[in-house]
């Protein structure tokens, strides 16, 4: 609701401090994904530091566990088929595009956009933690309210709509919840609790005696929200007189005058129907019907409604997901969707036939980073819509073209080369795992038989191979080296001692990853006992400087081409996950927080670009001749051998300039060498 958050910020007395402990708490999952990434000060420029995001998620929920707060996460589902929020979605896409363009110019970190795999990382980690996850078929606000009222507990969100919903347990802004628990006395016992600002609609209505709370939805609608354009009712709001405020003890700014005037006017209203009639007569006849529908829809939306999740809690009623014709999706599909395993993107494909692609830090003179994954999406569309083959259905994609947002129509692919016709959704469950694996490999044109590698890496290697073959620009081979090395290092970091975990100047928590994978899951031939604690600590120290944000200036320009390559890879990873999950996971999912740190990829690739012998440089850092180095070197060479040279940029080997006189220095030379020392580990690596 426009202006509502700032109004409550001006009037903190409308909420009260409370201690949160020994209760359930329903959290708006979509809100938390954004808030936690941004509040953790994680990088957005280089594609996402997903391992650090995973650590932040674990730490965040660990605090709730300490205070015996049982969290229930509820997520938005697909877009509304009525397109009520279409303009809002388009505006947000345009805002994100504007921000991405600003970042791409210089790599400036003063603006932020959420990396596109953050949603998947968040859901993966909370699932590991055993937290309850519920994903709605569409907008989640009403379900969040219904679930909270069922349990009699509060809702936590940043969404100002929850100031309007009648929530018995009250509303807590996410950013008001303390990060550190305190110890309080409850009776004779001492418990851990989190302080927070707690709000209930009675706090607001106390300033407007006689106000019927049934009119609050009307208040929100007339002000304007994501579903209703506030300008529709400007003429009506302009007729309302502002009351004297001295007795109400409320602080307002100029932008809040209409809000207070509307509350005062509604205070004297006697019924919803009569109030709607009074509003409509002030509008032009040509907009009345549409305005009335918007008002009535909003009254229903904010009011008490039945909840499929609550019915499931009460009597075990089955959760059904219906397609556009009203027929149910297969049971496995519905179960996977409502538990958050399947992406809402799939529902947008199946029901709305409309998808929105979030702009990344692209090269804006090049095609969108989503262009290289188009064949994957067309296959995904075909899997979801196979039952509609022959109906001439097309998916409307909203994506950037150049520096502007455009709409494109893309038709599903219903056949895959070397496999044949795609199965319908209800047929997938009947296919054996080998058939589903063959279908996945055919989609990615990946011949698994020519390589030896651990099974957990299958999806990653298939996606990397696909990306290199379909990228809109040739790839820097050093990025491939960095990517495979990153996968190994992210297995080692959680097992390093605290003194070796100093990344970006801060030690990583020992509980960063409570279930670190064994090294043999990424490198064949290396036994876990061969990688001793000394080896792990030394290796992590060697690479520690590459996890810190790089400095961009006139001498070290932001490499937009490198980031653009990473962006293309991420779109391929995202749609590969959806394909694997629609096929009921014939392969183990790639866990993005265990294979991708964008800052490391950027820094280490740039470092390798300065090295005439990048493979030798990596070998020295891993410990030349060690089991770890030998296994990684073999792994890289084998994978590289199946990739054609045409996928990569031809590299000019850097030469090391000789100094004419090593004893003659000036201030400028000292400064240059000081800068060089940031990227050199020791002098013995200088020629590598």
Image (tube, rainbow, N blue to C red):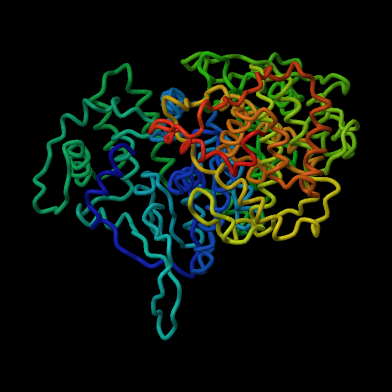
In front: 478, or 587?
Answer: 478
- Asked whether the viewer can see residue 417, the reply is yes
Q: Is residue 161 above or below residue 574?
A: below
Q: Is residue 31 above or below residue 494?
A: above
Left/right placement of residue 156 relative to residue 525 reads left
Q: Is residue 241 above or below residue 234?
A: below
Left/right placement of residue 535 relative to residue 154 reads right
Work out which quarter of the rendered image holds the N terminus and state it.
top left
Q: Residue 270 location in percent, x, y?
A: 24, 45
Q: State how many labels appear.
A: 0
Residue at 72% from the left image edge and 23% from the top image edge: 468
Residue at 21% from the left image edge and 25% from the top image edge: 235
Which quadrant of the figure has residue 669?
Answer: top left
Which quadrant of the figure has residue 620?
Answer: top right
Q: Residue 286 location in percent, x, y?
A: 32, 16
Q: Residue 345 location in percent, x, y?
A: 61, 32
- Asked whether the viewer can see residue 359, the reply is no
In front: 174, or 59?
Answer: 59
Left/right placement of residue 158 relative to residue 140 reads left
Residue at 75% from the left image edge and 38% from the top image edge: 330
Residue at 79% from the left image edge and 25% from the top image edge: 443
Work out which quarter of the rendered image holds the C terminus and state it.
top right
In front: 629, or 260?
Answer: 629
Q: Is residue 527 above or below residue 23?
A: above
Q: Residue 671 location in percent, x, y?
A: 42, 35
């Amino acid at each position: 609701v426009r202006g509502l958050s700032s109004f409550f910020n001006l009037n903190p007395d409308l909420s009260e401090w409370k201690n949160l402990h020994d209760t359930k708490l329903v959290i708006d999952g979509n809100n938390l994904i954004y808030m936690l990434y941004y509040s953790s000060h994680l990088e957005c420029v280089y594609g996402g530091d997903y391992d650090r995001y995973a650590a932040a998620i674990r730490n965040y929920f660990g605090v709730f566990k300490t205070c015996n707060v049982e969290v229930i996460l509820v997520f938005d589902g697909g877009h509304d088929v009525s397109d009520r929020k279409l303009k809002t979605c388009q505006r947000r896409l345009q805002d994100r595009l504007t921000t991405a363009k600003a970042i791409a110019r210089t790599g400036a970190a003063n603006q932020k956009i959420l990396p596109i795999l953050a949603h998947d990382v968040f859901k993966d980690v909370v699932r590991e933690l055993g937290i309850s996850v519920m994903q709605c078929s569409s907008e989640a606000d009403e379900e969040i309210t219904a679930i909270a009222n069922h349990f009699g507990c509060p809702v936590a969100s940043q969404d100002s709509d929850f100031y309007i919903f009648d929530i018995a347990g009250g509303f807590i802004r996410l950013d008001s919840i303390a990060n550190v628990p305190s110890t309080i006395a409850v009776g004779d016992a001492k418990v851990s609790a989190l302080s927070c600002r707690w709000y209930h609609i009675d706090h607001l209505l106390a300033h407007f005696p006689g106000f019927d709370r049934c009119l609050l939805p009307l208040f929100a609608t007339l002000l304007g929200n994501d579903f209703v354009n506030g300008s529709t009712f400007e003429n009506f709001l302009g007729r309302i007189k502002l009351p004297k405020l001295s007795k109400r003890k409320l602080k307002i700014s100029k932008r809040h005058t209409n809000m207070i005037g509307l509350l005062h006017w509604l205070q004297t209203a006697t019924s919803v129907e009569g109030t709607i009639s009074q509003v409509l007569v002030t509008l032009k006849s040509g907009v009345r019907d549409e305005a009335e529908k918007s008002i009535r829809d909003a009254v229903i939306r904010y009011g008490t409604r039945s909840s499929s999740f609550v019915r499931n809690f009460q009597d075990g009623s089955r959760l059904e997901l219906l397609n556009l014709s009203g027929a149910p999706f297969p049971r496995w599909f519905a179960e996977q969707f409502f538990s958050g395993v399947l992406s809402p993107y799939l529902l947008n494909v199946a029901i709305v036939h409309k998808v929105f692609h979030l702009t990344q830090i692209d090269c804006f003179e090049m095609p969108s980073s989503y262009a290289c994954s188009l064949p994957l999406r067309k296959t995904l569309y075909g899997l979801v819509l196979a039952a509609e083959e022959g109906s001439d259905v097309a998916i409307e994609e909203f994506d950037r073209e150049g520096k502007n947002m455009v709409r494109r129509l893309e038709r599903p692919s219903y056949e895959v080369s070397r496999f044949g016709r795609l199965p319908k959704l209800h047929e997938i469950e009947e296919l054996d795992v080998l058939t589903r694996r063959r279908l996945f490999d055919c989609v990615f044109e990946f011949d698994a038989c020519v390589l030896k590698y651990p099974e957990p890496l299958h999806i990653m290697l298939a996606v990397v191979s696909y990306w290199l073959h379909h990228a809109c620009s040739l790839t820097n081979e050093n990025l491939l080296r960095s990517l495979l090395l990153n996968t190994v290092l992210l297995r080692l970091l959680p097992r390093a001692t605290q003194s070796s975990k100093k990344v970006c100047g801060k030690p990583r928590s020992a509980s960063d990853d409570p279930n670190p994978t064994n090294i043999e899951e990424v490198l064949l031939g290396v036994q876990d006992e061969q990688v001793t604690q000394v080896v792990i600590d030394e290796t992590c120290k060697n690479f520690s400087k590459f996890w810190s944000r790089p400095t961009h200036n006139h001498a070290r320009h932001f490499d937009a081409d490198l980031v653009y390559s990473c962006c293309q890879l991420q779109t391929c990873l995202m749609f590969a996950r959806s394909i694997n999950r629609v096929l009921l996971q014939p392969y183990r999912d790639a866990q993005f927080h265990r294979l991708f740190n964008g800052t490391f990829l950027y820094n280490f690739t740039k470092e390798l670009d300065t090295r005439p012998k990048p493979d030798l440089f990596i070998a020295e850092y891993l410990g030349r001749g060690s089991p770890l180095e030998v296994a990684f070197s073999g792994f890289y060479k084998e994978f590289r051998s199946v990739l054609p040279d045409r996928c990569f940029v031809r590299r000019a080997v850097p030469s090391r300039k000789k100094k004419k006189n090593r004893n003659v220095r000036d201030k400028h030379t000292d400064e240059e060498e000081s800068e060089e020392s940031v990227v050199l580990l020791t002098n013995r690596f200088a020629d590598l």
